[in-house]
Amino acid sequence: MTAPSPAPAPPNRGGRWIQHWDPEDEAFWKATGEKVARRNLVFSVLSEHIGFSVWTMWSVLVLFMGPEYGLTPADKFLLTSMVTLVGAVVRVPYTFAVAVFGGRNWTIVSAGLLLVPTVAAFAVMEPGTSFSTFLLVGLLAGIGGGNFASSMTNINAFFPLRRKGWALGLNAGGGNIGVPVIQLVALAIIGASGGPRVLLGIYIPLIVVAAVLAALYMDNLASVKNDTGAAKDAARDAHTWIMAFLYIGTFGSFIGYSFAFGQVLQNQFDRTPLEAAYVTFVGPLLGSLIRPVGGSLADRYGGSRITLWNFVAMGAATAVLIVASMQKSLALFTVAFVVLFVLSGLGNGSTYKMIPGIFQAKARASGLAGEEAAAYGRRLSGASMGLIGAVGALGGVGINLAFRQSFLSYGSGTGAFVAFLACYAVCFAVTWAVYLRRPAARPAAASAATEEKAQLSYAEV
């Protein structure tokens, strides 16, 4: 009788580097891997959470900026658009930084960098500051958007495929919740007649705490390396750009609406800063909390199916918003906007779950199996996540620019919502056509069989 094999030895954590990491090995995962992965997940979420708060702090700061600041609504929408743009662009280098410096090491650095935009905003936040100065300092806040990409790349390497939907959903949701948290803090400060510098002063020590905790409790994975070939392969693969487009519809909506919601309430419904702050946090809060649910549903039913019907629901909510906007119904508008936030969060979780599954399905369709297929999936999905996250965040830029143009042209956000409805319709069509539509019957050729096998596999991702 063969003796049972011993449990894998604990990973070598000398210098906070783990040399051996194989989460797909169930014995390794149960013995040591899960505990280590969960610990890194917790402190990754904390750093990413504060990064999101810093990235979106200008969505709150503009609520404090009354007539004495001399900024028009168009100025404010332009400001938040540019902050979103920088956050999208820096996601690409942040993705590759994990392999260069190590997940733990880069989390320390990226958390510490958040001090730059926070201290700069603290210094200039007063009436009389020029718009160009506000714009420059706002651009610095964009680096907070990069934390998401490095955090997702890092956590993707820690967890096995069967748990990625849950882990990535929780990691992203915990980061996304930084948006409503900073809005809640702002609500308390506005209610207490405090100023914007109070808000910024609260976050400066929190940034330091996040960096210190990352240094104490996180690990680097020696197995995570930048693969230039994988990056090129991901950039050439059509699925990378298809998923980037779908992510525009989900995460782009979430981050764009997070920046714009308060301003729309102020400009279209004449809400005061305090009245706007009372409701702006609700949508991002629920959208963040629901993101892990989207990942879990995708694990169970398939990400493509959840994503498809989620776009249907987002389109329906947007249609209600158009009606509410035209009828100037604040109650209906607010409820529909919050529902749209929830759906964008759900879709965030399901789309990110699709990414590793798509590349594994592609590997299986090409004849790979077992660890070979898993390795191919990890290689391509890790390389593609930075591009997908960056392009997806550009949706937030588009949303704020659309609102800016809509208010300039029509005096309301109705025109922008019509454009968003058309976008969700296209996202639905793309999801169905690429990942759920079965190929038409064709002669029994090898290529046709391979295509059908891939198509059926994609329906499960």
Image: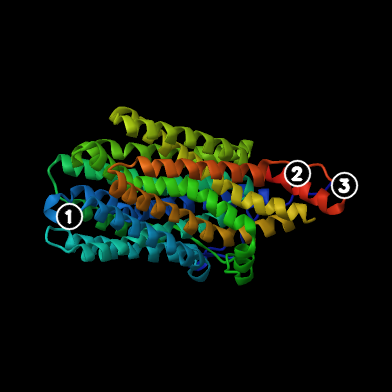
Secondary structure state at the residue bearing disc 1: helix
Determine which of the numbered discs, if any, sits on residue 439 in the image: 2
Label 2 close to label 1 by CB (< 8 Å): no
Tag 2: amino acid: Pro
Residue 211 in sight from this viewpoint: no
Left or right, 157 with reference to 281: right
Position of residue 229 measured from the top left corner of the image (x, y, whole percent): 64, 70
Q: Are marks 2 and 3 in contact (CB under 8 Å)?
A: no
Q: Nearer the viewer, mark 3 or mark 1?
A: 3
Image disc number at residue 13: none
Marks 2/3: CA distance?
12 Å
- Residue 395 at x, y = what percent? 44, 52
Tell me which residue sits at (33%, 59%) in the image.
83
Among the two numbered marks 3 and 1 on one chain, the one whose residue lies closer to the N terminus: 1
Q: Nearer the viewer, residue 258 or 167?
A: 258
**Residue receiving disc 1:** 197
The number of callouts visible is: 3
Residue 123, image x, y percentages: 17, 63
Disc 1: CA contacts within 10 A as few (<14), some (14-19) or many (>=20): some
Q: Earlier in the sequence, mark 2 or mark 1?
A: 1
Q: Which residue is at a point 24% across and 42% down the rendered structure image?
A: 267
**Extreme residue toward the front, this view:** 409
Q: Residues within 10 Å of mark 2 (few under 14, many from 20)?
A: some
- Callout 3, which amino acid? Pro
Secondary structure under badge 2? loop
Residue under label 3, please give it. 443
